[in-house]
Image (cartoon, rainbow, N blue to C red):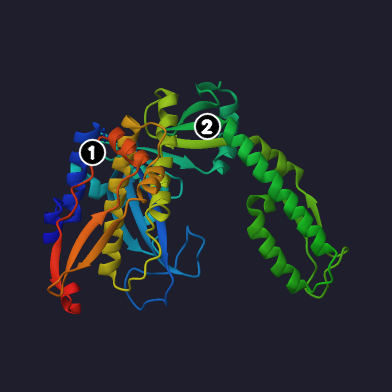
Amino acid sequence: MQRLYCLGLPPSKKDLFRYLRARWQDLFQTEFEVLLYDLTSTYFECDPPASGKRRFGYSRDKRPDCVQVIIALVVTPDGLPLAYEVMQGNTSEKTTLKAFLKKIEEQYGRAQRIWVMDRGIPTEEQLREMREANPPVAYLVGTPRGRLSKLEKPFLELPWAKVKESVEVKMLAQGGELYILARSEGRWQKERAMRRRRLKDLWKRLQELQGQELERDQLLLKLGAAKSEAGRAYGLVEMQVPKPEQPANAQTFTFRLRKDKLRQAMRREGHYLLRSNLPAEDPARLWQHYVQLTEVEAVFRALKSDLAIRPIYHQKDSRIEAHIFVSFLAYCLYITLGQRLRALAPGLTPRAVLEKMSAIQMVDVWVPTTDGRLLILPRYTQPEKDHQMLLHQLHLQLPSQPSPRIVSQGVDSIA
């Protein structure tokens, strides 16, 4: 706690979150009507613990073989972090939202906030509670495209409204909610290319399996691996597998393209379905709110790559919490640098600046004295011309060189 005070930081997470809100508002005039909420996981390469928060669970890092913890995060649309929580690694997404809504309300009071979330987080019951709260808690959440089957007919009768160069939306009010169907040209091209590639690879793999002499169990194992590789494309193919007593060959193992499913997939490619309890307002504003959810994903990418939150080797929950706390503070500095770059040096990213400035290093120069002691001169390397230009552009100044010190040559003194 004393170290936090020395750094000018509040002593607890709750105080820190309150401090951050005030600083973000003071530095960047940030508004807090829209909050983005998402979760990620970070894993440990160690033996499963007997207790604590490390647990096996759904791994967003593609490491189901490792125990993990879950990190829930709330940020502003500008990517400024407001609050986080560390939970057990087997925590279900759907169980986290209610506690976080309460936490933010207790921390900052009631307000007309809009919560933007991905589709896997809220349950139907939680959305109903948000609609029926007094006052209602506004939300904008992604919705599985399978729900389009029920809404396809009423949506067909509505016109498209252009919200930006390559994005169009339709809005449908139904059952006290507003459904927003968005169509993105860029997303359509990406999903079409992905579907074609995966379907082509799957078809080739099925042809290979058809030509091999396999037992039925061997075939089923290989089909399971092919399914994980193909993803949604696997559902576009209908297969006839051998009966338990039959071997796999071209007669007992057949497959064909499900053209009805393919046509349906092609119609839905490039489409997003959103739902909200907000009134029908400017569709461009609603779309912009949801697109800003990528800011949370950018936070997670920065934590795991630029700031290297992984790997975590700690075994105790208190040390795990401390590790993530320091990573959170590092991200606060990282995003502050990004905001500063946006205003003073557009085009530069925090990653590029950190890579450039990493050439400036701190070194200790040890000089023996005539009386048997050591003169230690801590010095940072002299910044080059491009470093000086960057510091000038960002209105930053390197601190003065540290003062020299004299120690005896004993090991304890030097340490």
Residue 208 shown left or right of residue 297 in the figure: right
Residue 105 shown left or right of residue 359 in the figure: left
Count of number-bearing discs:
2
Across and down, in percent, residue 314 comes to: 33, 71
Note whether 316 is above or below 230 in the view shown. below
Mark nearer the N terminus (1 vs 2): 1
Query: Which residue corresponds to the image point at 69% horizontal and 53% vertical from the top-left?
Result: 234
Query: Which residue corresponds to the image point at 34% horizontal and 43% vertical from the top-left?
Result: 384
Across and down, in percent, residue 114 comes to: 32, 36
Pick the front one: 130 or 88: 88
Callout 1 secondary element: helix
Please, which residue is most extreme toward the right here?
A: 251
Separation of residues labelled 1 and 2 (CA atoms):
33 Å
Question: Which amino acid type corresponds to the residue marked 1 in the rendered image?
Answer: Trp
Residue 217 shown left or right of residue 378 in the figure: right
Of the 4 image quadrants, the one containing the C terminus is bottom left
Residue 181, label in figure: 2
